[in-house]
Amino acid sequence: MYPTLTEKANILVKFNEADPLGIVWHGHYIRYFEDGREAFGEKYGFRYLDIYNHGYSVPVVKVDCNYKRSLRYGDRVIVETTYVNTRAAKLKFEYKLYNAATGELVADGSSMQVFLDIETNSLQLTLPSFFEKWKREHGQLEQTK
């Protein structure tokens, strides 16, 4: 069993994220997922610039979002981001968004990213060595005997 790697970020809903009725536009929930990945990367030493400096980009190839409740301008949203370990050369995260004041779940979802070599733009089918090292350091790599 692998340890769970999770980070929480507390984000203020801004004026420009809401419609004239003060309700957050649905597309911003995906951006909150991105904010969660950024916070996760800061905590676990796996920021986008770190990945880029190793010669890779990690574009999102799939995202799912299940909306439960509306957020409004001025609310605070807690973004809980959890890394989902896989054997494949990809990044998978699960998200839960909570209204910070009420604790209500407002959305949940997931995303998947793949590794592309930044020079050739080629899809990586095996774990990049720096990612394998990161997984080992965080207890996410199967130990061979």
Image: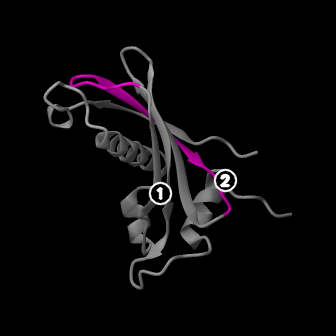
Q: Residues within 10 Å of mark 1 (few under 14, many from 20)?
A: few
Q: Residue furthest top?
A: 102
Quadrant occupied by the N terminus: top right
- Number of callouts in the render? 2
| Pick the front one: 23 or 134 | 23
Please give the name of the residue rendered at 55% of the width and 53% of the height, measured from the top-left corner. Answer: 92
Asked if the stretch drawn in magenta spans residue 81, the answer is yes
| Pick the front one: 107 or 140 | 107
Q: Which residues are magenta?
A: 69-87
Please give the name of the residue rendered at 49% of the width and 41% of the height, measured from the top-left corner. Answer: 109
Mark nearer the N terminus (2 vs 1): 1
Residue 64 drawn above or below residue 108: below
Residue that badge 2 annotates: 140
Please name the amino acid that badge 1 sits on.
Lys
Residue that badge 1 annotates: 62
Q: Is residue 136 left or right of residue 145?
A: left
Q: Residues within 10 Å of mark 2 (few under 14, many from 20)?
A: many
Asked if the stretch drawn in magenta spans residue 32, the answer is no
Residue 21 drawn above or below residue 120: above
Please name the amino acid that badge 2 sits on.
Gln
Q: Secondary structure at mark 1?
A: strand
| Pick the front one: 105 or 139 | 105
Q: Quadrant of residue 126?
A: bottom right
